[in-house]
Image (spheres, grey):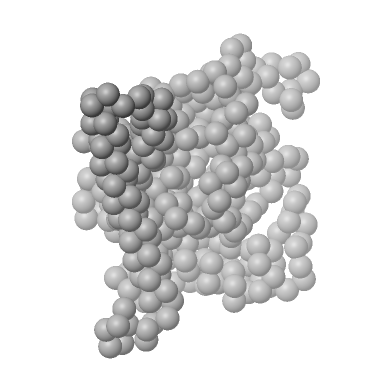
Amino acid sequence: MSAPGFWSDLEKAKGLSKRYEDIKSELQQWENLKVEIDELLGLAKLTENGGDLAAEIALKLKKLTENFSQLEFSVLFSGEYDQGGALLSIHAGTGGVDAQDWAEILLRMYLRFSDKHHLAVKVIDRVDGAEAGIKSVVLEITGRFAYGWLKSENGVHRLVRISPYDAEHLRHTSFALVEVLPVLEDVQEIEIKDDDLRIDVMRAGGHGGQSVNTTDSAVRITHLPTNLVVKCQTERSQLQNKNNAFKLLKAKLLKYYEAREDERIRRIKGEYQKAEWGNQARSYVMQPYKLVKDHRTGQETQAIDEVLDGQLDDFIESYLRRQAPIVS
């Protein structure tokens, strides 16, 4: 950090400084754990010499085990982008209004999860359904390990329930696609030429097609060589929407180029899948029984209400351990 020119790019320097402090703190925690283990071994030797310290040793051992489990779990966040933020998109799939309602239920689930883990959430784009729910939403989620936590959610999520929108109260199956991309702090390696972009501005549309404001604040960017399209409309400022759209486009381009270069990169960010039957990563069944099952790891629970309230830790840990089988 004392190197010449380090602070010339203030935002980049701040990010590197924070990363340095995070690593320094983590190393200190491991060193503290080693000191506590040595102290515990010392107590154990006293017991061998006739000391009555069994209760104290048991209490310290329990605390050490808990501390080790927390530190060992953090090792699973070893991916290139795991320590940074995430761009999480939810798209309603097949199932009509039920699918749009399901997309909004997932939105609430991720908001609750983020709150529990002290992650900050910003809505970059949101398109409401005409009758209920949402057609799509894009969230920027920031905080330490945000992408590491949420990358496991990439894929199709399937819901089975008695539809509240069916007059005959029949059981319906709905789908939603969740896409998770890393927030790129340093995107210099991705070159975007002005000639490769088509930028359209328009009025932002609200619920049921209503206008959010009377100015052309919504921005849609099309990357012509790849035909990737992003749109942002939640901010009242056209410039802010444009900046958010560029951030999302760069993340999508990273995914596109990496997948083209190396098929193995799909283990980091997953493949694009249609939000329909046969492609689901996780199923949530409310009727005729209650069960949440991750089809990639086999992790399951009957506590569907708790899961939809943001209790995703067991599913995420199972996924991370499957992706890093050496750590167990």
Q: Does residue 211 lie above or below 167 as drawn? A: below
Q: Nearer the viewer, residue 34 or 121?
A: 34
Q: Quadrant of residue 14?
A: bottom left
Q: Residue furthest top?
A: 288
Side (left or right) of 1 relative to 218: left
Question: Taking 318 as reference, is 42 left or right?
Answer: left
| Residue in the image at 44% along x and 48% along y | 180
Which quarter of the image is occupied by the C terminus? top left
Q: Residue at x 29, y 70 (%)?
A: 189
Residue 150 locus on image (x, y percent): 45, 45
Percent across and percent down for residue 100 are 64, 38
Horizontal side of 116 relative to 18 (left or right) equals: right
Name which residue lies at 37% across and 86% down.
8
- Give 105 or 146, whichever is nearer the viewer: 146
Residue 146, x across and y down, in percent: 46, 51
In which quadrant will I find the N terminus? bottom left
**Quadrant of the rendered image containing residue 210:** bottom right
Residue at 33 percent across and 50 percent down: it is: 32
> Residue 64 falls in which quadrant of the image?
top left
Residue found farthest to the front? 50
- In the rendered image, is residue 313 in sight? yes
- Is 264 located above or below residue 242 in the figure? above
Q: Is residue 13 left or right of residue 177?
A: left
